[in-house]
Image: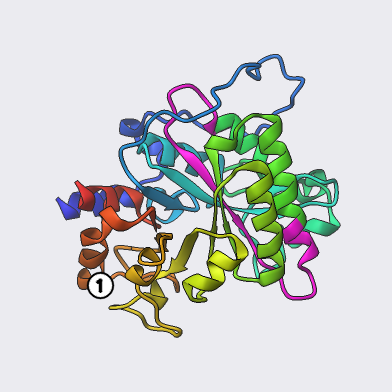
């Protein structure tokens, strides 16, 4: 069984008829497009799992991370959510991408460029244009979809906190305009300045935010966060970094807790992947708000 899952993991989505995923053409959805639906569901269908596909399970499906194709893969598995990274752009939009060396999308700093300029600088390896948050919502906010977007507010550095703060604010405005609050959640960098902006948006827009700080629960609660989202490398009994925390430390404080990433193999610096660690998180699954992985199909098979 495990060999079969592993074999599927390396087959590109476009070659997977069993996933029933339509080929993705490079498009730029427009609010004036007559094919864009005018009435969308305002909440997802019920979901039977708590699995988040990190960057859409790119490592498993073979599609570019943060792509529409990866989102469709996540939706085909009926995962709870796809995790994706957001950045504010010069033209006050939100681009979905994973920046290289912290700052660069297609070799450009997104806050210094428009979406059009970022797209002109390069496409994804499957031919897609870089997606905006609106593009992602156009895909996920459809009748029958049980999948949400978990939007990662990426930190830049201590001198650039304005841009992540703008990212969460603008993302919330776009989400509110579409009445998509129940299709979206945020996870926020541990940076205290950005966290303050995210906490304010959490109150104003009623969209949950998981803070990725390794601080003790009191620090989370003092900032207004009741959900902690931590890297597995800090969580006992399989912590490899400090400060070492436990799931129960947060649960006993009345908080929700989620973890990233629980994987089947080495490759992500924030992941655990030993058989013992995987079995531990499977055994604690009922206690978790959600669980993130680069291999969603594999993890779903473990949880059945």
Q: In this view, does 27 lie to the left or right of 295?
A: right
Q: Looking at the image, which residue is at 45% across and 44% down?
A: 81
Say if the magenta span includes residue 291: no
The magenta span reads 140-165
Q: Looking at the image, which residue is at 64% across and 66% down?
A: 100
Say if the magenta span includes residue 157: yes
Q: In this view, does 146 lie to the left or right of 196?
A: left
Residue 262: % across, % down: 34, 63
Would you identify the image quadrant in which residue 237 lies? bottom left
123 vs 132, nearest the viewer: 132
Q: Report the coloring of the rendering.
A: rainbow
Residue 43: % across, % down: 51, 29
Q: Is residue 258 left or right of residue 201?
A: left
Q: In this view, which residue lies farthest toward the left?
A: 1
Does residue 213 show up?
Answer: no
Vertical arrangement, residue 200 with respect to residue 131, above or below: below
User: Which element carries disc 1, helix, strand or loop?
Assistant: loop
Vertical arrangement, residue 131 with respect to residue 86, above or below: above
Neighbor class of circle 1 (other Cα within 10 Å; few <14, some 14-19, many 20+) is some
Would you identify the image quadrant in which residue 276 lies? bottom left
Residue 195: % across, % down: 65, 64
Q: Looking at the image, which residue is at 80% across and 75% down?
A: 159
* Residue beneath disc 1: 274
Vertical arrangement, residue 215 with respect to residue 127, above or below: below
Would you identify the image quadrant in which residue 205 lies? top right
The total of numbered circles placed on residues is 1
269 vs 210, nearest the viewer: 210
Residue 39: % across, % down: 61, 16
Does residue 225 show up?
Answer: yes
Q: Looking at the image, which residue is at 48% across and 76% down?
A: 216
């Amino acid at each position: 069984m495990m060999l079969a899952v592993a074999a599927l993991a390396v087959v590109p989505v476009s070659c997977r008829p069993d996933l029933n995923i339509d080929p993705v053409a490079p498009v730029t959805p427009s609010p004036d497009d007559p094919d864009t639906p005018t009435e969308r569901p305002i909440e997802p269908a019920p979901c039977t799992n708590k699995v988040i596909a990190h960057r859409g399970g790119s490592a498993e499906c073979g599609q570019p991370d943060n792509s529409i194709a990866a989102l469709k893969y996540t939706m085909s598995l009926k995962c709870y959510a796809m995790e994706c990274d957001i950045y504010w752009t010069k033209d006050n939009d939100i681009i979905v991408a994973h920046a290289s060396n912290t700052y660069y999308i297609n070799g450009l700093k997104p806050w210094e460029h428009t979406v059009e300029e970022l797209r002109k600088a390069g496409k994804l390896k499957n031919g897609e244009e870089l997606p905006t948050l609106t593009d992602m919502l156009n895909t996920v906010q459809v009748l029958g979809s049980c999948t949400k977007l978990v939007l990662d507010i990426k930190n830049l550095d201590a001198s650039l906190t304005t841009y992540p703060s703008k990212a969460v604010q603008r993302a919330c405005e776009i989400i509110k305009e579409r009445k998509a609050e129940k299709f979206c959640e945020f996870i926020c960098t541990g940076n205290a300045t950005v966290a303050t902006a995210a906490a304010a948006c959490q109150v104003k827009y009623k969209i949950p935010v998981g803070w990725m700080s390794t601080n003790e629960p009191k620090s989370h609660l003092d900032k207004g966060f009741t959900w902690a989202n931590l890297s597995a490398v800090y969580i006992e009994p399989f912590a490899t970094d400090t400060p070492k925390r436990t799931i129960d430390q947060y649960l006993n404080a009345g908080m929700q807790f989620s973890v990233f990433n629980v994987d089947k193999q080495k490759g992500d610096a924030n992941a655990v992947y030993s058989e013992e660690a995987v079995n531990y998180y499977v055994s604690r699954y009922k206690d978790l708000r959600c669980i993130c992985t680069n291999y969603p199909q594999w993890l779903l098979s473990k949880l059945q």
